[in-house]
Image (cartoon, rainbow, N blue to C red):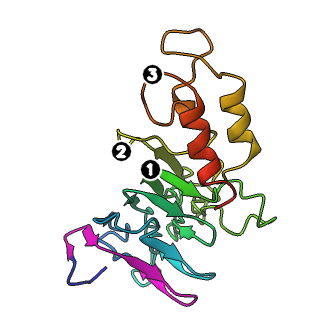
Amino acid sequence: MYNALCSESQCDFIELNLTATGKIFTLYNATGDSRDLLINITSNNTRTRLTFLSGGQIIFSGRNGSDIAGSGTRGGHAGLLNISVPDLLNTTFVQLIGRGAYTTAASGAGGAGGRIQISFHGLIGNFTDDVRLGTAANIPIMGAGNGSAGTLGSSGSYIYVTKLRNSLRDVDINGDGQVDGTDRDAIKTRYGNETGDATFLSNADINNDGAINILDLFRVGFEWNTR
């Protein structure tokens, strides 16, 4: 990816909005593997500094093998995509695509699927299980590549890292990208719990004061159905 705000594989943006036709592509290395990409949102002055309109994509797939040399080549591996957002990450229309590529050589596996690491304080929508969309359109695509020999490469993987702010926890207690009765009930069933109690749940202690009480319930009510 070429951009004045990028240095090697890291790109620092105050704000990034992908339009309905907006696409970010990573470059390939000499063997056809996708280069890694780190997108770092550096400001949390507004709640959602990284947004996607329907159709906006980040593509970090490998390059298909070539037959130009006559004997074929290995399909490229998809890269690592690392996204860091200091507040809310809106995943409603996000499309992340890191496919392993096709191997044209007579033997050998296809390219490996990509890896995704996302760091955020909270979610708007959950791109692995967004019940409001009723579709799997925003689930990351990180499939393994195939090859002439019919051998698949390894599938991709992803991981969430949510501990980006230590003062207040996100009000989306169960991490499904919505603020609703499930989060309210998580507090109600543990109301009065303090650190050290058997049923204490740290995610329900939103203000991080060691007790689950009206202050935490107030925070859920304040953001009720805002996502």
In which quadrant of the rendered view does residue 50 lie? bottom left
> Residue 121 bears which disc, if any?
1
> What is the number of callouts on the image?
3
Mark nearest the camera among 3 and 2 is 3
What kind of residue is marked 2? Answer: Arg
Residue located at (49% from left, 61% from top): 89
Quadrant where the image shows the C terminus: bottom right
Residue segment shown in magenta: 6-24
Residue located at (49% from left, 67% from top): 105
Which comes before the other along the chain, label 3 or label 1?
1
Residues at circles 3 and 2 in contact by the CB criterion of under 8 Å: no
Q: Nearer the viewer, residue 8 or 61?
A: 8
Residue 100 vs 192, above or below: the answer is below
Residues at circles 1 and 2 in contact by the CB criterion of under 8 Å: yes
Residue located at (57% from left, 23% from top): 201
What kind of residue is marked 3? Answer: Gly
What kind of residue is marked 1? Answer: His
How would you rate the neighbour count of disc 2 (Cα within 10 Å): few for under 14, some for 14-19, many for 20 or more?
Answer: few
Q: Secondary structure at mark 3?
A: loop
The residue singled out by tag 3 in the image is 210
Q: Nearer the viewer, residue 133 or 151?
A: 133
Residue 102 vs 67, above or below: the answer is above
Quadrant where the image shows the N terminus: bottom left
Residue 71 appears at what percent x and percent y? 45, 73
Residue 196 appears at what percent x and percent y? 49, 9
How would you rate the neighbour count of disc 3 (Cα within 10 Å): few for under 14, some for 14-19, many for 20 or more?
Answer: some
Q: Secondary structure at mark 2?
A: loop
Which comes before the other along the chain, label 1 or label 2?
1
Q: Is residue 28 left or right of residue 204?
A: left
Mark nearest the camera among 3 and 1 is 3
The residue singled out by tag 2 in the image is 165
Asked whether residue 162 appears in the rendered view, the answer is yes
